[in-house]
Amino acid sequence: MKFRQLEAFHNLMISGSTVRAAELMQITQPAISRSIAELEASLGFSLFDRVRGRMVPTTEGQLFFREVSESFKGMDRLRSVAAAIRDYGSGHLKIASLSALGAELVPRAIQDFRLKNPRVRITLHILPSAQVRNQVVDGNFDVGLAADEIDRSGLDTTHFGGFSGVIAMAPNHPLVKLDTLAQEDLVGQPMIGLAPEDRARHRFDAILNDAGVTPDYVVETPSSTTACALALSGDAIALVNPLVVDGFVARGLVVRPFTPAVNFRSFLLFRPDAQKSKLVRDFTTCLFNLRNTAG
């Protein structure tokens, strides 16, 4: 029993004639008849009665067709899965992102991506950059976005962007009256600091130290999003990633440029042993398109 014989039988049953079955399979009518005869020989029973030139299914043939039909439904499912893999990789895109990019930019990229790929399932986890790195290395995520303090060894990385930090503050803060802030404006100001390992914080502290300003950190947090929330509700100010501020500005947060610029740098992370699927390529295109708009 060969698949080609089963295919001839299936097409003959659904079309009702050897002529139409031959057209469906793009072979000759005698080839259909020969495949049916060979199948019957291998099964040990007749699938059709030959009545005045017509092939009428026997009871055994009808019973056998039910099972063959179920098998062909499975084949149709396999063809659909194969098409999905060809077009979309696994059909499931798993993304890990640091919170600064995961707050607004990544969700917007996901929405743009879904407009063209509505059937793709997406998982998004917001994690600290070090965990993003480890999860991508372990193969648990297809793509990661992390800040530049991570160890990039063992990864395929692409520089994603650098975004100039802004100072966030409550709307009643005295510094609101200034259009741009510099090192000397921060003297004596209570501040919300990012985590000590954050590279943007390192760059900010170095700029302040070069100007003889000692930052007065009263709160520390690894997240620019949390820093915005703290600044909005208190008297301390924070240097934050500009990509997280929009929702907070709508709630009253005030942001001001800081000079000299302090860049928040980020990288796209991929497993070095995994070829990028069409899913990953399409999603990263959406990310870069939004990055270009943002900055």
Image (cartoon, rainbow, N blue to C red):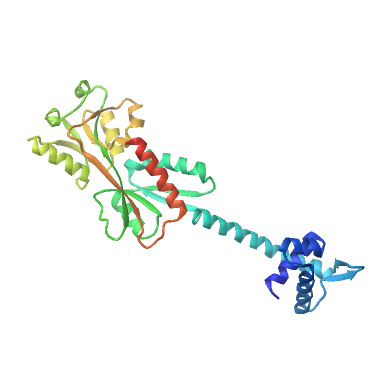
Q: Quadrant of residue 185?
A: top left
262 relative to 104 in the view: left or right: left
Q: Is residue 145 above or below residue 47?
A: above
| Residue 169 locus on image (x, y percent) | 24, 28
| Residue 84 locus on image (x, y percent) | 55, 55
Q: Residue at x 75, y 73 (%)?
A: 35
Q: Quadrant of residue 45?
A: bottom right
61 relative to 102 in the view: left or right: right
Q: Residue at x 79, y 75 (%)?
A: 37
The number of numbered discs placed on residues in the rendered structure image is: 0
230 relative to 274 in the view: left or right: left
Q: Quadrant of residue 68?
A: bottom right
| Residue 266 locus on image (x, y percent) | 29, 46
Q: 53 or 209, which lies in front?
A: 53
Q: Is residue 232 above or below residue 226?
A: above
| Residue 238 locus on image (x, y percent) | 22, 34
Q: Is residue 239 above or below residue 3?
A: above
| Farthest residue, direction left | 212
Task: Assign the N terminus to one quadrant of the image.
Answer: bottom right
Q: 92 or 80, which lies in front?
A: 80
Task: Assign the C terminus to one quadrant of the image.
Answer: top left
Q: Is residue 65 above or below residue 135?
A: below
Q: 208 or 248, which lies in front?
A: 208
